[in-house]
């Protein structure tokens, strides 16, 4: 048992002859009613392969893979949002291998994750059994071994391909990222590629058909026949066909042909516009975008660009792609790293967690014009003071007066008086002293001395003079 813990590779054995591996990959619970359907899907899979030859699928997958490599990874302590980018685990994820950078490693994991539904990494240990790196393993080179009772006792790793020998790897020596859980095989993640087999196959066939139309000058075929009944084009029509194909295709297209007898040439023309090939290919684009959670317009697919405007709408769709695809992937990966890697670096792994730093992702930042407009409305509505506004916008506010801009049209009413009819206000009786004073003579203006002394001395001065001007 100790030897197994010291090395992830503890047993080599020749590859067994496993039967029905494809059916095992699809799930062990297939019944006879679903057999015909999966036989046709097997044909689709043979044509689609691992999906890397599909421009439709890879355009979407590579967009997400580039986004996963965009945000740095840090470690946060429980109750503290501060990112620690110098944590040993953060350094391992940034430089996982001497042969791959952190960005290349994350892109490789994202491609496997979004096509197969599973991404694997082998833990690289030093002489003290400390994890110092991660080695990515493609899904086709590894699979879990399921015992008669239990979950997974080890993984079968094929370093030289499935025709070579098997290396058994303990589960604790691997990092297995799953795209959820496959209901047909609870030990694996669900494969988006398997869901999209029919759509990708349709797109590949439509693309091949379009290419063949262009290759054959927009027609399905040409018929050469004798001009008169009873004539023949020769003893070997197949050789004549091959000769014409060799002499009038490619760079020889449009060359001169000389016939030794009357010959009729007929073209089986096809009007491609009536076939609506663009609409035929837009349906798979919509399906791929829906499954992966990335709007078609973000990737540049025609199905999305037809109904999308430029400007703010595109920015909103890019933010939607982050919210529906990238950020959930980041959360799934962070949770798996917390579970499968954090214990290698911390004695109390529950107090730490991995996190992607999206603070510098431009599409997730709030528009500067929108923030400025909102701050101005708060200032003009009396919600914040002038000094708070300047501090919010990053301006110097040391000498700014702390004043509020209150609209004159707003009536301040206590909550307990809302909807209550207020009694009429009684007129205030005038001050007897003020009433005894004679009114000022029209046109009389106070002199500079009265202004300087204020209102009270001016009244006393008037009384002393008897109110004379």
Image (cartoon, grey):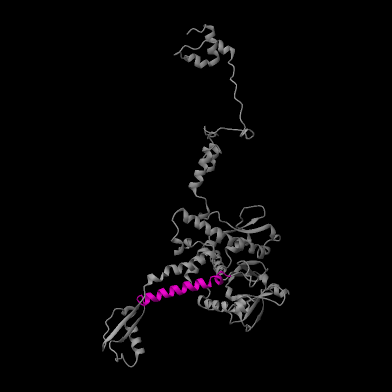
Q: Name which residue lies at 64% across and 73% down.
A: 185
Q: Name which residue lies at 45% across and 69% down.
A: 281
Q: Name which residue lies at 49% across and 74% down.
A: 201
Q: Is residue 351 above or below residue 49?
A: above
What is the quadrant of residue 172 in the picture?
bottom right
Q: Looking at this view, is 184 or 246 the one in front?
A: 184
Q: Is residue 156 above or below residue 102?
A: below
Q: Which residues are magenta?
A: 191-219
Q: Main secondary structure of the magenta part?
A: helix
Q: Looking at this view, is 277 or 343 the one in front?
A: 277
Evaluate whether residue 394 shows in this view.
no
Residue 16 image point, x, y percent: 64, 83
Evaluate whether residue 201 shows in this view.
yes
Q: Is residue 363 left or right of residue 335?
A: left
Tell me if residue 377 is in the magenta stretch.
no
Q: Looking at this view, is 33 or 395 the one in front?
A: 33
Q: Is residue 18 left or right of residue 228?
A: right
Residue 20 image point, x, y percent: 61, 81
């Amino acid at each position: 048992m100790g030897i197994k813990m010291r090395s992830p590779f503890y047993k080599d054995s020749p590859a067994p002859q496993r039967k029905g591996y494809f059916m095992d990959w699809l799930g062990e619970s297939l019944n006879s009613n679903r057999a015909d359907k999966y036989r046709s899907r097997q044909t689709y899979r043979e044509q689609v392969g691992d999906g890397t030859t599909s421009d439709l699928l890879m355009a979407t997958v590579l967009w997400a893979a580039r986004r996963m490599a965009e945000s740095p990874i840090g470690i946060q302590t429980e109750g503290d949002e501060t990112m620690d980018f110098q944590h040993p685990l953060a350094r391992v994820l940034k430089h996982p291998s001497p042969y791959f950078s952190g960005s290349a490693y994350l892109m490789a994991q994202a491609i496997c994750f979004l096509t197969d539904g599973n991404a694997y990494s082998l833990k690289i240990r030093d002489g003290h059994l400390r994890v110092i790196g991660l080695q990515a393993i493609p899904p086709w080179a590894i699979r879990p071994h399921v015992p008669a009772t239990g979950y997974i006792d080890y993984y079968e790793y094929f370093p030289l391909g499935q025709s070579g020998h098997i290396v058994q790897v303990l589960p604790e020596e691997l990092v297995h990222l799953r795209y959820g859980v496959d209901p047909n095989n609870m030990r694996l993640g669900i494969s988006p590629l398997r869901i999209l087999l029919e759509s990708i196959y349709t797109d590949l066939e439509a693309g091949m058909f379009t290419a063949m139309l262009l290759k054959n000058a927009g027609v399905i075929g040409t018929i050469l026949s004798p001009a008169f009944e009873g004539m023949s084009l020769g003893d070997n029509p197949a050789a004549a066909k091959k000769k014409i194909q060799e002499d009038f295709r490619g760079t020889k297209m449009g060359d001169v042909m000389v016939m030794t007898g009357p010959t009729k040439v007929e073209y089986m023309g096809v009007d491609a516009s009536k076939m609506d090939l663009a609409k035929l290919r837009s349906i798979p684009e919509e399906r791929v975008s829906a499954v992966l959670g990335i709007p078609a317009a973000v990737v540049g697919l025609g199905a999305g660009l037809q109904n999308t405007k430029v400007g703010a709408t595109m920015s909103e769709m890019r933010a939607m792609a982050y919210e529906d695809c990238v950020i959930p992937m980041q959360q799934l990966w962070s949770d798996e790293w917390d579970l499968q890697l954090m214990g290698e670096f911390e004695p109390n792994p529950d107090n730490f967690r991995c996190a992607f730093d999206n603070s510098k992702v431009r599409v997730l930042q709030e528009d500067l014009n929108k923030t400025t407009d909102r701050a101005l409305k708060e200032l003009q509505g009396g919600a914040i003071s002038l000094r708070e506004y300047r501090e919010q916008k990053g301006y110097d506010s040391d000498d700014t007066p702390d004043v509020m801009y209150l609209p004159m049209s707003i009536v301040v009413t206590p909550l307990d008086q809302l909807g209550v009819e207020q009694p009429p206000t009684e007129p205030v009786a005038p001050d007897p002293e003020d009433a005894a004073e004679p009114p000022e003579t029209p046109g009389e203006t106070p002199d500079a001395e009265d202004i300087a002394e204020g209102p009270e001395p001016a009244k006393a001065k008037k009384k002393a003079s008897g109110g004379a001007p």
